Amino acid sequence: MLRSQLALFEPRTSPLDVTGRVESRRLHVRDATFKGGLASRVHRWFRLTPSFGPDLVNKILNDMNTPHGAVVLDPFAGAGTTLIEAKLEGHTAIGFEINPLLHFVCKASLEWSLDSDGLRDNLTRIGETFAQQRANASGRSLDQLGYSAPPIHNVYRWWRSDVLLDLLLLLDSIRSCISEPKRAQFFQMAVAGVLVPDLTNVTLGRLQLHFIDRSSHDIRVWDTFEAHVKRMISDLEDVRQLSEIGQAEVHNVDSLNLPVMSLPHVDRVVTSPPYPNRYSYVWNTRPHLYLLGFFRSAKDSSQLDLNTVGGTWGTATSVLSKGRVEPALKVIEREVLPLTEEIRKQDNLMANYVIKYFNGLARQIASQDPLLKNGAQLAYVVGCSCIKGVYVETDVLLARVFEGLDLGYSVSRIERFRRRHSGKDLHESTVYAVKA
């Protein structure tokens, strides 16, 4: 990002001391991370490993004394944790998400109007059609059946040929049986929800998917899909028993460069941007993006990763490895550049990545600013990192960026709630800020 892109904001030049606002308030891992959502209604529809947990979202909303019916924004919506919880609590939820698969996941997870009896009838029809198509496909290849493999690189490293055929037959059965878009979305969501790791040759690592040998595994596409659909229907029946639920909408946009939109003014922001640790949400959703048809070209994933705040894979790798990414603001130059110069001695790509990351966060805060009410409260959940032996204290740096933008934000506190398992100084924190 060029300095001129944020030239409207004249930063403060005095040092911003926020370290006195750092406090510790430890939470159990189930309360803080995606693990809390694995058994929670609706959240369990899709597992996104780096997500924060629904209990943490509720804690943040309570800590900010969020009034009933507030407008809650998540500009990095991910799998929709904030949006789902806000809707369950009777708020109006708004989300932005650049990744088309995660945008789809959010939309499907927030659609609670479908009747359960109708969905069960649909499931029966899909199952009958799938069984018939599978019988007809016996002994025939994808080409012979008129199917094209997803255009992901080295497709049969991702899926066994028999499993891939079953997945394509299942998706085709959904399309042929369900014409109503919201119902089709529900069942496609169920496929997405069990794809990784159950039906793909990968396991979930800390930072990315890892390929494993599943040649001898008993993989049953229909049984896995059917069980997940039944869980989803049960959740819909559960949430419809609530006396009052809110409204929610999610937009497939880049939160760093928001288009003009007609939206209600925001009371609260609860979000978790990518951490500066090279985790790629694009890389880790590639099988979903290609199988479900969101990507049509092998280059689509690397191009999207280049546009994200935390992306360093594919095209982003070659771009960031060359030249220098310059700080967009004086506060980033003052607070972040010294760290990156230490990193640059060992790795130019990662130095550029860290500058790009904080430039992106500054741009995102400035981009959403017109949507916020005066007095709006914000909570950003972030993680500190160690890059090439250099400690990147993301929470403190983000707090300084907030105040250094000179847009009227003040940081009330930085609450460190969890130590990450990769180092004693690598905290996960919530940075609380208020718009004057």
Image (cartoon, rainbow, N blue to C red):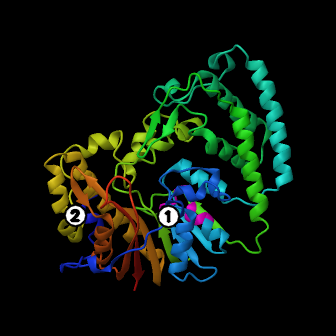
Give me the residue at 68% from left, 28% from top. 166
Task: Give above or below for 410 relative to 156.
Answer: below
Across and down, in percent, residue 212 comes to: 49, 30
Across and down, in percent, residue 175 comes to: 73, 38
Q: Is residue 260 magenta?
A: no
Depth check: 245 or 263 in front?
Answer: 245
Mark 1 closeness class: few <14, some 14–19, many ≥20 residues within 10 Å: few
Q: CA distance from mark 2 to mark 1?
A: 31 Å
Find residue 390 and report its image quarter. Answer: bottom left
Q: According to the image, label 1 marks what residue? A: 28
Task: Give above or below for 296 relative to 83.
Answer: above
What segment is highlighted magenta in the picture? 75-84
Label count reads: 2
The numbered mark at residue 397 is: none
Q: Amino acid at mark 1?
A: His
**Residue 414 shows up from this direction:** yes
Figure quadrant of the C terminus: bottom left
Find residue 161 and report its image quarter. Answer: top right
Q: Secondary structure at mark 1?
A: loop
Give me the residue at 28% from left, 40% from top. 318
Question: In the image, is 355 to the left or to the right of 237?
Answer: left
Q: Amino acid at mark 2?
A: Val
Q: Secondary structure at mark 2?
A: loop
Task: Give above or below for 52 relative to 117.
Answer: below
Q: Is residue 77 magenta?
A: yes
**Residue 262 shows up from this direction:** no
Q: According to the image, label 2 marks what residue? A: 336
